[in-house]
Image: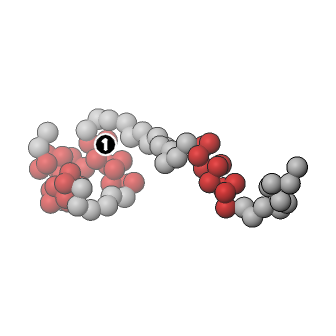
């Protein structure tokens, strides 16, 4: 499907479709829904962790001040 066809189907200006494809602008959820509906697709958003949970916990623990002497037996 061309950008012009997609733009007509989802009522979004063709230059905006071009900017979205090029990654030159942000997009609102409503616009994404309209684009995906026009392409007969479902929109599925999945979270992607930026860190492993164990790494995040280790960093958090490093930020805490010691409540006792860590070298004491």
* Residue topped by disc 1: 36
Q: Nearer the viewer, residue 57 or 28?
A: 57
Q: Residue 59's spot in the image, x, y percent?
A: 62, 54
- Left or right, 37 with respect to 9, comes to right
Q: Nearer the viewer, residue 48 or 35?
A: 48
Q: Which image quadrant: the N terminus?
A: top left
Q: Can you see residue 17?
A: no
Q: Residue at x 11, y 43 (%)?
A: 2
Q: Residue 25's spot in the image, x, y percent?
A: 26, 62
Q: Residue at x 24, y 56 (%)?
A: 23
Q: Residue 60's spot in the image, x, y percent?
A: 66, 55
Q: How many marks?
A: 1
The image quadrant that residue 28 belongs to is: bottom left
The image quadrant that residue 71 belongs to is: bottom right
Q: Residue 37's spot in the image, x, y percent?
A: 31, 41
Task: Check disc 1: other Cα within 10 Å, few if <14, some if 14-19, many if 20+.
Answer: some
Q: Secondary structure at mark 1?
A: helix
Q: Residue at x 80, y 55 (%)?
A: 70
- Left or right, 13 with respect to 58, comes to left
Q: Can you see residue 39?
A: yes
- Left or right, 48 with respect to 11, comes to right
Q: Nearer the viewer, residue 70 or 37?
A: 70
The relative height of residue 4 versus residue 63 in the rendered view (above or below) is above
Q: Nearer the viewer, residue 27 or 39?
A: 27
């Amino acid at each position: 499907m061309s950008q012009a066809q997609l733009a007509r189907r989802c009522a979004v200006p063709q230059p905006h479709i071009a900017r979205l494809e090029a990654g030159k602008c942000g997009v609102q959820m409503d616009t994404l829904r309209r684009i995906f509906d026009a392409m007969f697709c479902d929109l599925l958003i999945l979270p992607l962790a930026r860190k492993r949970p164990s790494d995040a916990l280790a960093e958090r623990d490093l930020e805490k001040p010691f409540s006792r002497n860590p070298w004491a037996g």
